[in-house]
Image (cartoon, rainbow, N blue to C red):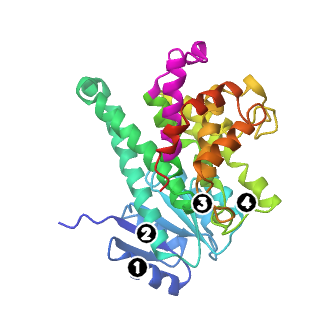
């Protein structure tokens, strides 16, 4: 029995339909449509697992088509990835706001397109499983609790991997910062620093939710995320918006679930990990203890990994130099008390794999 997923490719350019069909057909069943109108005819008798929808089409463009898709109970849950030759962050944000799950520029990179489809289909499969479990929760709660937690963690990890799939410059960053946070949390608990604030914290949930600290990068243009060099001022200002975007994305997820602890943590990580102790950070310019403690913790783990990793505009700094830079930024960029915690455990940070 063929268990391949059905992908519906919609593009008014027949050459694009042929190209897309050729490199998708090995892994998926592919249906093609040269217009939005014909797409809706196909949907009358078929429900694809994912739609690749061109934006710039005559008669009915992709924005108009997705509004109809999302308004219908029969098609509103079909994941839609927009395809376009444009590369503007405003266009991408509009598409995501209308309900698209991703935004891919043409000409296609076949390997990248296949990876994004794979990740999104995995997320959709887990969403359906989660919906099923929620409907039957009362009957299944005792035997399925651990399974739900495992699935929740898998969903978080999948979303985090989606960010890294788009931002291939910083591969492994999420896992490494998670390890750094774990080291800091263990020392905070042992030393009693900020004991009142940390009382009652669920460390496992904290570590899970930390994976979403950069989820807002989903809303940042590929041209910025994948730029092979240092960002200019305009690009950097756009990149800085990922903290606010991340907070907004998690708030949307919160409206769909009653389980909020890990989302509460995730939102704090996403919104505050670029704030600075002296108030010069973003997005809110918070200062000192006004910055949530989770954000101050993430800031150290995040910067340490950035310092010790290769970037297109810099080499990887040695561990010792990275520690020195963080120590010199105590009281300006970082919480002095947390820098002391970091220094006590600097050798443990050195053991975090860099690749």
Q: Which residue is mark 2?
A: 114
**Toward the viewer: 108 or 342?**
342
For label 2, the SS is helix
Quadrant in the picture for residue 274: top right
CA distance separating discs 3 and 1? 32 Å
- Are discs 2 and 1 less than 8 Å apart at CB? yes
Residue 99 image offset from top left, x and y in percent: 57, 53
Cβ atoms at labels 3 and 1 below 8 Å apart: no
Q: Can you tell which mark lies on residue 310?
A: 3
- Determine whether the residue tagged by mark 1 lies in a helix, strand or loop: helix
Asked if one can make out residue 69 in the rendered structure from this viewpoint, the answer is yes
User: Is 198 colored magenta in this rendering?
Assistant: yes
**Counting other residues with Cα less than 10 Å from the Cα at mark 1, is it few (<14), some (14-19), or many (20 or more)?**
some
Query: In the rendered view, would you say 252 is above or below 21?
Result: above
The spot of residue 229 in percent (x, y) is 70, 67
For the residue carrying disc 2, how many other residues have a C-alpha within 10 Å: few (<14), some (14-19), or many (20+)?
some
> Gap between marks 1 and 4, in whole Å?
29 Å
Within 10 Å of disc 3 (Cα), the crowding (few <14, some 14-19, many 20+) is some
How far is disc 4 from disc 2 in space, using C-alphas? 25 Å
Q: Nearer the viewer, mark 3 or mark 4?
A: 3
- The residue depicted at 63 percent of the width and 58 percent of the height is 95
């Amino acid at each position: 029995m063929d268990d391949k997923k059905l992908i519906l490719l919609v593009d008014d350019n027949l050459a694009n339909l042929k190209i897309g069909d050729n490199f998708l057909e090995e892994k998926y069943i592919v249906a093609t449509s040269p217009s939005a109108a014909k797409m809706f005819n196909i949907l009358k008798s078929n429900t694809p697992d994912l739609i690749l929808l061109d934006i710039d089409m005559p008669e009915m463009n992709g924005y108009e088509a997705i509004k109809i898709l999302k308004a219908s109970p029969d098609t509103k849950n079909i994941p839609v990835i927009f395809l376009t030759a444009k590369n503007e962050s405003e266009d991408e944000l509009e598409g995501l706001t209308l309900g698209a799950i991703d935004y891919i520029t043409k000409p296609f990179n076949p390997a990248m397109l296949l990876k994004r489809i794979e990740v999104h289909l995995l997320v959709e499969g887990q969403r359906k499983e989660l919906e099923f479990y929620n409907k039957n929760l009362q009957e299944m709660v005792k035997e399925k609790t651990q399974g739900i937690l495992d699935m929740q963690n898998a969903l978080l990890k999948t979303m985090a991997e989606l960010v890294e799939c788009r931002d291939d410059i910083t591969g492994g960053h999420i896992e490494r910062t998670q390890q750094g946070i774990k080291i800091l949390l263990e020392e905070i608990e042992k030393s009693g620093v900020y004991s009142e604030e940390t009382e009652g914290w669920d460390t496992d949930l904290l570590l899970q939710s930390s994976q979403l600290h950069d989820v807002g990068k989903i809303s940042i243009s590929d041209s910025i995320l994948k730029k092979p060099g240092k960002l200019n001022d305009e690009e950097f200002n756009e990149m800085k918006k990922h903290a606010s975007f991340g907070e907004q994305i998690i708030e949307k997820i919160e409206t769909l679930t009653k389980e909020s602890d890990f989302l509460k943590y995730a939102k704090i990580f996403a919104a505050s990990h670029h704030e600075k102790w002296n108030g010069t950070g973003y997005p809110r310019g918070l200062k000192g203890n006004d910055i949530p403690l989770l954000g101050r913790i993430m800031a150290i783990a995040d910067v340490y990994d950035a310092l010790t990793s290769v970037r297109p505009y810099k080499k990887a700094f040695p561990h010792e130099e990275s520690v020195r830079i963080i120590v010199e930024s105590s009281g300006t960029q970082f919480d002095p008390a947390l820098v002391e915690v970091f220094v006590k455990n600097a050798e443990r940070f050195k053991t975090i794999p860099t690749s």
